[in-house]
Structure formats: C-alpha cells, structure tokens
Image (cartoon, rainbow, N blue to C red):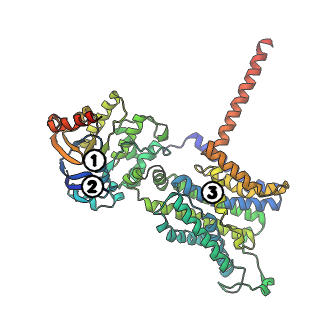
C-alpha cells in the first residue's frame, strides 16, 4: 500500500511525543511521579493485552492481573537465581506466561462470552492462591530458596538491568520495552492475525468460510496477550524492589476491564489511557487528599458512560468532543464577528 | 462436478434435507425452492457448519464432508451469506485479503490477487475504505470478491441479490455468470429472483421440504408443473 502523507505526519507526531515522554518528562517531575509513570507504562502493556483480546477478538479475560503476577514471579525467580541478562529474563517471563495460558486456554476456548470470563476469573483466583502459598522469591539461596524471617537482613532488591539502575533510567527502559510491545501488537493487528481476529469477532461463520482456523487464532491472541503481560510482569519485578501476592488482587483484573473499556478497546491508544487511569489517577487523587477508592467510583461511572454513549472509549470520544467544541467556538466567534461586522 | 448422494440432515424432529440426490454438473447451477426448502441448510452442510445424518458429497472427486471445515476454503470452497457478512471494521482490501490469507494464496501475490478480485466484481470504492461505510450493493459485491479471490473451485452464492433493485441485479447477474469461465469454478446460486436464476444458470435444481423436486436445464425445470405448484402452493399459504 502506498504510504500517505497523513500517516507520515502521524508517525512523526507519535515519535515526537514518545521522545518527550522518554527524555523530557523524567527531568520535569520528581522521583515519586517517575515511579508512578513507570507503573502506568507497565499497566498499559497489560491493558494492551486485554484490549487486544476484547476489542479485536471479542474475548473477555478476567485473569490478566494474575498473569502479570505469573510474569513477575517468573522474572523475580530468574533475577535472583540466575545471572541472565535482563532482556532475556523478560523474554522468558513472557514465554512462560504465554505457554501456561496456551495449556490452560486450549480447553477454555471451547466456551465464549460469560463462560469464558468466569473460567478466566477462577483461573485468576487459583493463581492468586498458589502465589500466596509459594510466595514471591526474596533472595534466598539457590534457585528455589526463600529467606526465613530471621534472615531478612540479607534481603536484596530485585535486580535491575545494568544500564537502568536509577529510577529515571528504569522508567526509560520500561517505556522502551512497552513501546516494543505496542509495536508488536500493532504489527499483529494490521496483518494476517488481525484480519482473522476481526472476522472472528464480527462473524464466526464468515471467518470459518474464509478458512480461518478459529480455535488456533483465538489461542494465538491469548498467547500473544499473555506474552506481553508476562513481559510487563518482568518489568514490574524490576521496578518494585520487592513483591508480594498482595500487589495482584484478583479483583484488579475486573478493574482493568473497566478502565480498558473507558480508554477504548478498539484502539491501542486506549491501553495507554487505561494504564494512566489505573496507576496515575489514584496517585493524583491521593496527592490531592482524596481517598484513592474514589477512583473505583469514577471508573464505575466512566464505564457506564462509555457503555451507554461512547463504545469507542475516551480515545474515540475526546477527539470528537474537541472537534465539536472547536466548531462551536469558531461558530460563536464567527457570529460575534458577523454581528460586529456591519457596524464596524 | 458435485455429486450429492442421499444427503439427509435432521435437527431434532425436523428433516430440512431428506435423501437429497442430485448432480451439479458445472458452470453456474441454480438451486431454488420455497422458503424453508433446505437450500441454506444444504450450503451449511457444504461449508461444514452442519453435520449431515447420512449421505455423501463428492466435489471434483473429493469427499467434501471428510474435510475439516476451515480447510475447505483452502481447497477452494467459497460462499456468501444470505445476510451478507462483510467485516465492517476491516477495510475493503483487508476483507478480501482475509480470505486470501487462509486459502492457499502466497504473501507475494496477495496485493495483486485482492485488487484483481475487486476489479472482477467492479467494486469502485477505494480499497482503504472501511466495509462498514459501504452501501448494500457494494457489500454484496465485496462478498463476491471474497468468494472469488485466488483460486475458487466451488462458489456458493446464497441470495446475493436479496434487497437489491433490478438495475443493480442486472450487473450482479453479469458478474455471477462470468465466474465459471474466469476461474473454472462451479457456482451454485440460490435465489428467489427467477429472472436472475434464468439469466445465470444453465441447469437448476429445485428443493421442496428438503426433497429434490426436479433438476435439469433451467428452462425445462421452470416449466415443470410440480415446480410451479410448489411455488404457487407457498403463495396460497401466505
């Protein structure tokens, strides 16, 4: 396909914004907010996976936060137990998460809709349970070691990549990896799998008649979303210093579904908005002295609003509203100018 | 050539197809009958959506029913739907490319094959346009482009002219009639528009309550008194 001028402009704007977020933002804000934005970037990747499943294929998964925990656990183990380079650890965390989901998903994909949501939710509960029994690694000896309470003075933070030990550097590292995940998603959506997913979502008979192996493509979507979520888990491990199962409550997967709906499930930008909503908004509320639980209330209202009036989510709605406002203003200015015109 | 032998489909106590035995010799073949005669069910059997209780279907010598449903497109079986199923969120190009992806086409030939298919049906909209913004006629043509991209061997058209005005049906008839010579594919056309069926089909088969009523050259079949009665019969019931 020919490349159009609009696309070039779009790519340049995105690259500019990314450079701004990468270099300017950590200089302008304090360490606390850098950490918050690191978390937002990580959760954007998780939201990206869920958005891909729900928006592109039409499958509701309520186990994404549990999969984030699986990725984080795997990465933490590897970071304490081995000297593997950080990018390799991220890759393995993603692959392990993807493989687990493929094994579990194969029988689960025979059902859809509410039943699939229920199965994934129970899977999430099971993972949470297992994690609370086996605990996150905390730097005990060997590959499977666990420090006992008496040895906690030996605790070391979860390892970070050598080039990104400081918080701003780790923020940049996270942003780069997140951008790679977004590129991976966009590439898949705009090629053969994306076309098959769209057909499956809109009309399974049409997909089947076109020769799409529906089970295989659903499974690939699940594996891909889980891979990205596992990589995000690895990033989270490096960002946190220490991890516990408390960071991955099962209900967070449901909250994530709400925010991705608010952000927009039909555009990958919805995932960026979702990441900001779920990590930056509560921090802002706390900063302003408002209870962070108010964010849950806002998400609830937001989802109602989106489901009722704007199925494309904020990324679809806001530009439209801005254009409308622009027209309204220019119309108003024109009218005032017109009214003054004859007199002047 | 498609040979159907003793095909029977049962849904609970209903038998939408009852021991259907017929041969579709080639070219464009009509398949007509009153509503509920089993025409779409027959297509669904060929597509693999419905498993028959008994019978066999051989297409160009191959046992079609033994093939996994999603492999039939790669083999060359294509279809359109009574309620057209253009994928609205995909562009016109991607709608056709979606079929090309899974029906044995190579990546290198994709662009040319898709554009050829769009040109074949005379769809004059930008390939980038989303299918969701197309009109009814354009979506019907898009579905036929999907059904003919690459190397189709059997093309099933389920009421492709439903809801179209007469002058648009005339163009559609030209497109449909030229599928066999252009691709060497066998076309089975289901439609209630007898002028479309007469214009396109050398041979026609008639189903009524799941049973084959008649088959043969279209002109003869349409003069058959059983066929006329079957059609008039449903009108009287209305």
- Residue A167 vertical placement versus B162 (above, below): below
The residue under label 3 is A257
Q: Secondary structure at mark 1?
A: loop
Q: CA distance from mark 3 to mark 2?
A: 42 Å
User: Badge 2 is on which residue?
Assistant: B9
Residues at discs 3 and 2 both on one chain: no
Q: Chain of mark 2?
A: B
- Mark 1 and mark 2, same subunit? yes
Of the two numbered discs 1 and 3 in the rendering, the one whose residue sits closer to the viewer? 1
Residue A90, relative to residue A10: is it above or below? below
- Mark 1 → mark 3, Cα distance in angstroms: 43 Å
Q: Quadrant of residue A165?
A: bottom right
- Is the residue under label 2 in contact with that under label 1 (CB below 8 Å)? yes
The residue to which callout 1 is attached is B38
In this rendering, position of residue B65 left or right of residue A62: left
Residue at image point 25% right, 41% down: B33
| Helix, strand or loop status at disc 3 | helix
Subunit bearing disc 3: A
Quarter assignment of residue A149: bottom right
Q: Position of residue A271 (x, y in %)?
A: 64, 54
Q: Nearer the viewer, residue A149 or B193?
A: B193
Q: Position of residue A117 (x, y in %)?
A: 55, 61
Q: CA distance from mark 1 to mark 2?
A: 9 Å
Kindly check if marks 1 and 3 are in contact, taking CB atoms under 8 A apart as contact: no
């Amino acid at each position: 396909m020919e490349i159009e001028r609009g696309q070039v402009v779009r790519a340049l704007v995105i690259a500019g914004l990314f450079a701004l977020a990468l270099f300017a933002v950590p200089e302008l804000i304090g360490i606390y907010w850098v950490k918050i934005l690191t978390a937002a970037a990580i959760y954007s990747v998780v939201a990206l996976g869920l958005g891909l499943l729900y928006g592109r294929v039409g499958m509701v998964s309520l186990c994404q936060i549990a999969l984030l925990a699986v990725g984080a656990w795997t990465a933490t183990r590897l970071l304490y137990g081995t000297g593997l380079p950080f990018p390799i650890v991220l890759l393995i965390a993603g692959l392990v998460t993807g493989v687990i989901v493929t094994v579990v998903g194969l029988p689960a994909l025979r059902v859809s809709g509410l039943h699939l949501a229920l199965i994934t939710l129970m899977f999430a509960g099971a993972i949470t349970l297992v994690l609370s029994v086996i605990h996150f690694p905390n730097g005990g000896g060997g590959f499977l070691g666990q420090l006992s309470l008496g040895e906690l003075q030996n605790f070391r933070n979860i390892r970070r990549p050598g080039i990104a030990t400081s918080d701003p550097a780790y923020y940049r590292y996270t942003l780069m990896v997140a951008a790679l995940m977004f590129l991976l998603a966009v590439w898949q959506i705009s090629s053969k799998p994306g076309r098959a997913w769209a057909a499956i979502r809109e009309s399974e008979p049409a997909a089947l008649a076109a020769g799409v192996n529906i089970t295989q493509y659903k499974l690939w979507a699940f594996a891909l979303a889980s891979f990205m979520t596992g990589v995000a888990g690895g990033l989270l491990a490096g960002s946190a210093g220490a991890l516990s199962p408390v960071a991955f409550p099962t209900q967070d997967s449901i909250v994530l579904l709400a925010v991705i709906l608010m952000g927009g499930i039909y555009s990958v930008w919805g995932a960026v908005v979702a990441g900001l909503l779920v990590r930056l908004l509560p921090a802002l509320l706390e900063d302003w002295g408002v209870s962070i639980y108010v964010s849950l209330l806002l998400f609830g209202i937001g989802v109602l609003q989106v489901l009722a009036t704007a199925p494309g989510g904020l990324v679809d709605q806001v530009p439209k509203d801005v254009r409308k406002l622009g027209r309204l203003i220019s119309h108003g200015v024109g009218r005032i100018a017109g009214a003054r015109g004859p007199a002047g | 050539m498609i040979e159907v032998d003793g095909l029977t489909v049962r849904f609970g106590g209903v038998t939408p197809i009852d021991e259907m035995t017929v041969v579709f010799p080639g070219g464009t073949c009509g398949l007509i009958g009153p509503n509920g005669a089993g025409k779409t069910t027959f297509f669904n059997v060929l597509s693999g959506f419905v498993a028959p209780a008994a019978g066999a279907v051989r297409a160009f010598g191959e046992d079609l029913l033994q093939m996994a449903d999603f492999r039939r497109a790669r083999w060359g079986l294509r279809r359109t739907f009574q309620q057209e199923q253009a994928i609205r969120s995909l562009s016109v190009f991607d709608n056709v490319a979606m079929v090309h992806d899974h029906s044995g086409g190579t990546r290198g030939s994709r662009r040319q094959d898709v554009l050829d298919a769009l040109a074949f049906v005379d769809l004059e909209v930008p390939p980038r346009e989303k299918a969701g913004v197309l009109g009814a006629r354009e979506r019907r043509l898009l579905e036929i482009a999907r059904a003919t991209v690459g190397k189709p061997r059997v093309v099933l058209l389920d009421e492709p002219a439903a809801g179209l005005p007469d002058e648009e049906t005339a163009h559609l008839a030209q497109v449909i009639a030229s599928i066999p010579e252009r691709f060497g594919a066998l076309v089975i056309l289901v439609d209630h528009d007898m002028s479309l069926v007469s214009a396109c089909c050398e041979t026609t088969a008639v189903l009524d309550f799941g049973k084959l009523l008649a088959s043969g050259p279209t002109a003869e079949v349409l003069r058959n008194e059983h066929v006329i009665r079957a059609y008039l019969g449903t009108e009287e019931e209305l």
